Amino acid sequence: MRSDFAGAADTYDLAAVLAREVGARMAARLDLVKIAPQRIADIGCATGDGIRALQQRYTKSLPLALDYALPMLHAVRSRTPRLQRMIGRGPRPVNADVRALPLAANSLGLVWSNLMLHWLDDPLPALKELHRVLEVGGLLCFATLGPDTLKQLRAAAQGVGAGDTVKRFLDMHDLGDMLVAAGFGDPVMDMEMITLSYAAPRAFLADQRHLGVRDALLGRQGWRDWRRLLRAWPRDAERRLPASFEIVYGHAWKPEPRQIADGRAVVKFRSR
């Protein structure tokens, strides 16, 4: 998937309707949170919509734009206003994998990740790494795809015996358990469905290709199976093809440690 995503840097913005909408809804949720992070990071930043929105919200924070696809980071830079680049206020690009971040422990006040974690076969190592780089009291905000994503295509595939082609995603309860296992405290999870509609299957497939996720999302099947599957995709009342995406939102704080590195418990005494 890395090469597909890297190759999509020039076309990503053409098709990133869902990511922009989810990012806007994530940002609205920050209205309820009172934080003033010194350093913020957008993990899996793509072309940088998220980190630019965070810069506008937290004007005094140092912004980091992290992605494992180097062409995406080049796109972030090209979309940064020239004045910001000249005075050194643009997002700082970091080319890295979320499971091995080149960042110091306890160095970030806010970590943001929009529709990235679900591409990992096992998100737990990434969540542990995000916990490591967050400071105590730091906040993790993310959105992922849930298991009912593209339920219309799953039903069509089952109806024609084409097999389960769409990638399986974790539900919010599993992700909540992983957050606790990674060391986060009191995670809050919720979900909603967002449905896009397409005039024809070709438009849907083109979007996924422009995003660089077509094969990762849909898998590989023979052309004959795809033709049968796409013909069976049910149309809505307006004769368009509905594509529903289950969006799972999560946020969690990094609590004070209960034990130090050598395993001894931390006990606090309060004076009266």
Image: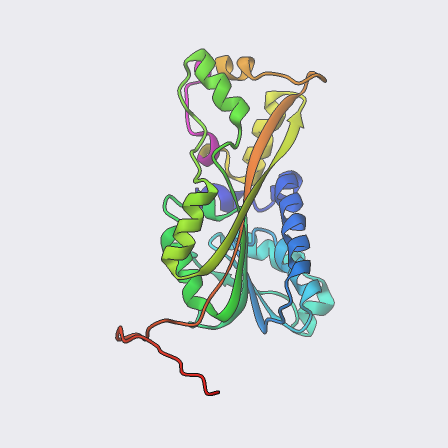
Name the residue nearer the viewer: 157 or 45. Answer: 157
Residue 73 occupies which quadrant of the picture?
bottom right
Q: Position of residue 187 (x, y in %)?
A: 49, 55
Q: Position of residue 269 (x, y in %)?
A: 40, 83
Answer whether residue 101 is visible to the viewer in this image. Answer: no
Answer whether residue 103 is visible to the viewer in this image. Answer: yes
Q: Residue at x 48, y 73 (%)?
A: 107
Q: Residue at x 47, y 48 (%)?
A: 117
Vertical placement of 78 versus 103: above or below?
above
Query: Of all residues shown, which one is farthest toward the bottom?
Result: 271
Name the residue nearer the viewer: 240 or 201. Answer: 240
Vertical placement of 79 versus 248: above or below?
below
**Position of 127 compared to 26: left or right?**
left
Name the residue nearer the viewer: 209 or 60. Answer: 60
**Position of 40 compared to 165: left or right?**
right
Q: Residue at x 41, y 27 (%)?
A: 220
Q: Position of residue 137 (x, y in %)?
A: 51, 70
Q: How many marks?
A: 0
Q: Position of residue 122 (x, y in %)?
A: 36, 47
Vertical placement of 147 versus 97: above or below?
above
Q: Which residues are magenta?
A: 216-226
Structure colour scheme: rainbow
Task: Based on the picture, tell me whether residue 167 belongs to the magenta stretch.
Answer: no
Q: Main secondary structure of the magenta part?
A: helix
Q: Quadrant of the N terminus?
A: top left
